[in-house]
């Protein structure tokens, strides 16, 4: 009679059960706390005074559709120039985007730079739905307070902000749309950072920011910029969007630039390319 050792038969099963349990626990944590992994806001005290990034700077407070009040900075341009509405990237707040505000304003454009729900002095909590509320409210504020219509507004969306800019651009035709280091979707970026696609990110994600599907409905002139050495959002994400986008469109890749240094890597070339593209819109 052949006897099989119990330890040899039960140990592998126990290991499998342990791995499966750990996997399920991690999946539950990932699902329940996913917005903690997506959004990285940095709060500001309500009494914080912004530096004079430009000579004329107006701090504004905008009420969104859910009643939350978000904070922003507005700088007037020269003459009857278009306004650039900036939706910044993920981490931090508008104090970390002064170079973008200054850059567009120095080109002569009016600028509105806002903080999303839960960022800086803005109330509420960030989510895809709430960021879209931020975009809509900012657009309405420009219309009412500054008499700016979509045809006189250029949307600028960096990384996370590309999702807000694309969403708005599906509803109106703007003077132009600039997407910097954009993604095709949050799921696509998540898959690139999780090893071997072990987690069903497409199924568990609550906030999708599906730019690839929406870009087909955008009919504003489009400029996409991306650093070739981007380690957070791969440059191929921009290429996917560019292929799906309608004309007129341009893709500007900055050789050697990473995700967070794209404005600093070759600043003269960066701003010259944007200025030339904007000038062609006039």
Image: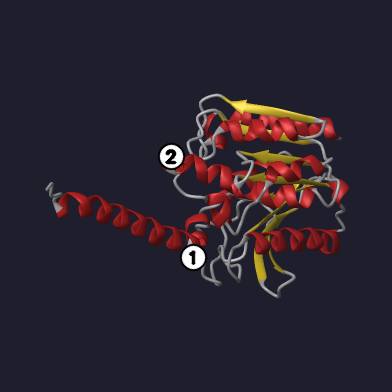
From this viewpoint, which residue is outermost toward the bottom? 67
Pick whichever, 59 or 206, lies toward us: 206
Where is residue 133, by image quadrant?
bottom right
Q: Is 234 placed left or right of 248 in the picture?
A: left
For marks 1 and 2, the one nearer the N-term is 1
Instruction: Examine the rendering and report whether any part of residue 138 can be seen.
Output: yes
Colour scheme of the rendered structure:
secondary structure
Does residue 65 lie above or below 41 as drawn? below
Quarter of the picture holding the C terminus: top right
How many C-alpha atoms fall within 10 Å of the one at disc 2: few (<14), some, or many (≥20)?
few
Instruction: Tell me where residue 269 appears, x and y as whole percent.
Output: 62, 26
Query: Disc 1 designates what residue?
Result: 32
Pick whichever, 102 or 265, lies toward us: 265
At x 85%, y 59%, the residue is: 143
At x 60%, y 71%, the residue is: 124
Pick whichever, 126 or 254, lies toward us: 126
Q: Which mark is residue 55?
A: none
| Label 1 element class | helix
How many C-alpha atoms fall within 10 Å of the one at disc 1: few (<14), some, or many (≥20)?
few
Query: Could you tell me if the residues under marks 1 and 2 are in contact, i.e. CB atoms within 8 Å?
Result: no
From this viewpoint, which residue is outermost toward the front? 1
Does residue 69 lie above or below 281 as drawn? below
Instruction: Examine the rendering and report whether any part of residue 109 can be seen.
Output: no
Query: Disc 2 designates what residue?
Result: 196
At x 59%, y 31%, the residue is: 236
Instruction: Tell me where residue 138 appears, x and y as whole percent.
Output: 75, 60
At x 70%, y 59%, the residue is: 132
Instruction: Tell me where residue 51 appears, x and y as whole percent.
Output: 56, 57
| Label 2 element class | helix
């Amino acid at each position: 009679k052949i006897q099989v050792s119990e330890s040899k038969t039960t140990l592998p099963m126990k290991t499998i059960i342990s791995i499966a349990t750990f996997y399920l626990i991690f999946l539950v944590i990932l699902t329940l706390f996913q917005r903690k992994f997506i959004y990285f806001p940095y709060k500001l005290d309500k009494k914080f005074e912004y530096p004079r990034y430009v000579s004329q700077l107006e701090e504004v407070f905008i009420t969104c559709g859910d009643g939350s009040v978000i904070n922003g900075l507005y700088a007037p341009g020269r003459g009857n120039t278009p306004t650039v509405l900036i939706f910044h990237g993920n981490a931090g707040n508008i104090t970390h985007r002064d170079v973008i505000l200054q850059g567009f304003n120095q080109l002569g454009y009016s600028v509105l730079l806002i903080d999303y729900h839960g960022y800086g002095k803005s109330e509420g909590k960030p989510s895809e739905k709430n960021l879209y509320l931020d975009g809509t409210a900012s657009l309405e504020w420009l219309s009412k307070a500054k008499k700016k219509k979509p045809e006189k507004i250029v949307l600028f969306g960096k990384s996370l902000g590309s999702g807000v800019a694309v969403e708005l651009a599906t509803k109106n035709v703007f003077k132009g749309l600039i997407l910097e280091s954009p993604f095709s979707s949050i799921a696509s970026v998540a898959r690139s950072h999780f090893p071997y696609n072990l987690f069903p990110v497409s199924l568990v994600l609550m906030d999708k920011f599906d730019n690839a599907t929406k870009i087909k409905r955008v009919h504003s002139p489009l400029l996409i910029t991306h650093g070739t050495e981007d380690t957070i959002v791969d440059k191929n994400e921009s290429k996917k969007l560019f292929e799906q986008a309608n004309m007129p469109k341009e893709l500007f890749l900055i050789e050697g630039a990473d995700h967070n240094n794209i404005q600093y890597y070759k600043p003269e070339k960066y701003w010259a390319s944007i200025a030339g593209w904007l000038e062609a819109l006039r």
